[in-house]
Image (cartoon, rainbow, N blue to C red):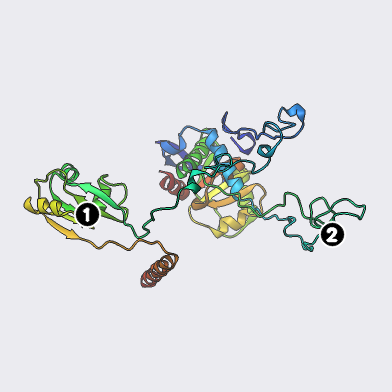
Amino acid sequence: MANIDVVNASNEKVGSVDLADEIFEAEVKPHLLWEVVRNQMANRRAGTKKTKSRAEVAYTGSKMYRQKGTGRARAGSRRSGVRVGGGHIFALAPQDWSYKVPKKVRKQALVSALADRKREGKLLVVDDFGLTEIKTKAMAEALAKLGATKALIVVGERNEIIEKSARNIPYVKVLPVAGLNVYDVLKHEHLICTKDAVGLIQERLG
Amino acid sequence: MDLSNLKPPAGAVTKKKRVGRGNSSGWGRTAGRGEKGAKARAGGSKGPGFEGGQMPVIRRMPKFGFKNFARKNYAIVNLRTLAVKFPQGGEVTPDLLVANGVLNKTLDGVKILSEGDVTMALNVTAHKISAKAKEKIEAAGGSVTLIEVAEPVKTKRNKAKLNAAKRAASATTEKSED
């Protein structure tokens, strides 16, 4: 069991908490991080695009003019993709880009991401931000003192005061443990966990 | 690690082959499809059973036989297996057989057959049992209980009915939880 200092909002040590080695000292596997982030990016694609193919363009299906004798090129359909106003040749269609990554891979990737933050010394455990009301200024000052201005803050349970104090600070995001994911961990330079969040993370991944 | 230095492991991503994009690509001209002709076109292949235009066997022969859609498939278990897996005797149920690794799944039901011998008292619950197997189990001091075989879900109408029943059941349990 490795220990990590628990600090308060002014970056003073106020205690320590145990970290499970199988999570925070795990081997960092970059290929899993890549695999899961790629999946997350794909899953959030809306896939909402659509153009009309020649079957869908609203024109008559009848032949434009007779086959022979007009002196013009042969033409079968007003809707053909080669005509102005015709359908698209390879028309776009709404598409679901999501796919599944095995649960074990997802879990291992999250473990890897957490271990990576720990290894680089970018994991901070905070007991309390010392906020009694929703105050962005106080939150910004706390983050500056912690030396983590681009941070993902993980709280145990959703906390309105922390969420609303942090939501207007650029490069800072607040997530409950249930929403912890590889993409957001990697996106933010620092990972700040509250003390109860550490326990819940270990419960979730242990 | 951050989002800027993620990369796939070597060999995980293969580049898509883009055919018909010019001769210098190596896949220009006939785009890897041999020479021109029917077989070079989309859909240009003959189906299975095609015999060059001669009346193929699958059409030369009359149809015969039929498929029984009401057929039930039983997972077979012999007494020999029960003797090995339940040396202490006791309960034997389809669920236990699956749990003990005797069966992967119970299919439409479980049928006990009589190959091998049992010496322990087994209380067997199964969908079907052969007369001889029943005799042997009872001779060893055990008992046999039969359970009814569920109707297989085959027709669309049947399926809809079962789903409706399931929904109704889950709705009532949810209500009772509230």
Can you give x and y, in whole percent of width and height, for residue B115 in the image?
Answer: 16, 44
- Most foreground residue, A194 or A71: A71
Residue type at mark 2 is Met
Front tag of 2 and 1: 2
Residue type at mark 1 is Thr
Can you give x and y, in whole percent of width and height, for residue A195 in the image?
Answer: 47, 48
In the depicted structure, whether residue B156 falls above or below residue A5: below
Secondary structure, mark 2, is: loop
Residue B119 placement: quadrant: top left
- The answer to whether residue A37 is visible is yes
Dot 2 and dot 1 within a common chain = no
In the depicted structure, whether residue B18 falls above or below residue A159: above
Can you give x and y, in whole percent of width and height, for residue B73 in the image?
Answer: 31, 53
Chain at numbered mark 2: A
Q: Residue at x 62, y 34 (%)?
A: B5
For disc 2, the neighbor class at 10 Å (few under 14, some 14 to 19, many from 20) is few
In the picture of the structure, the residue carrying the numbered disc 2 is A64
- Most foreground residue, B96 or A33: B96
Secondary structure, mark 1, is: loop
Chain at numbered mark 1: B
For disc 1, the neighbor class at 10 Å (few under 14, some 14 to 19, many from 20) is some
Q: Residue at x 10, y 53 (%)?
A: B135
> Separation of disc 2 and disc 1 at Cα?
73 Å
- Most foreground residue, A51 or B148: B148
Q: Which mark is residue B93?
A: 1
- The answer to whether residue A188 is visible is no
Locate the N terminus of chain B by quadrant. top right
Q: Residue at x 70, y 37 (%)?
A: B37
Q: Which mark is residue B176?
A: none
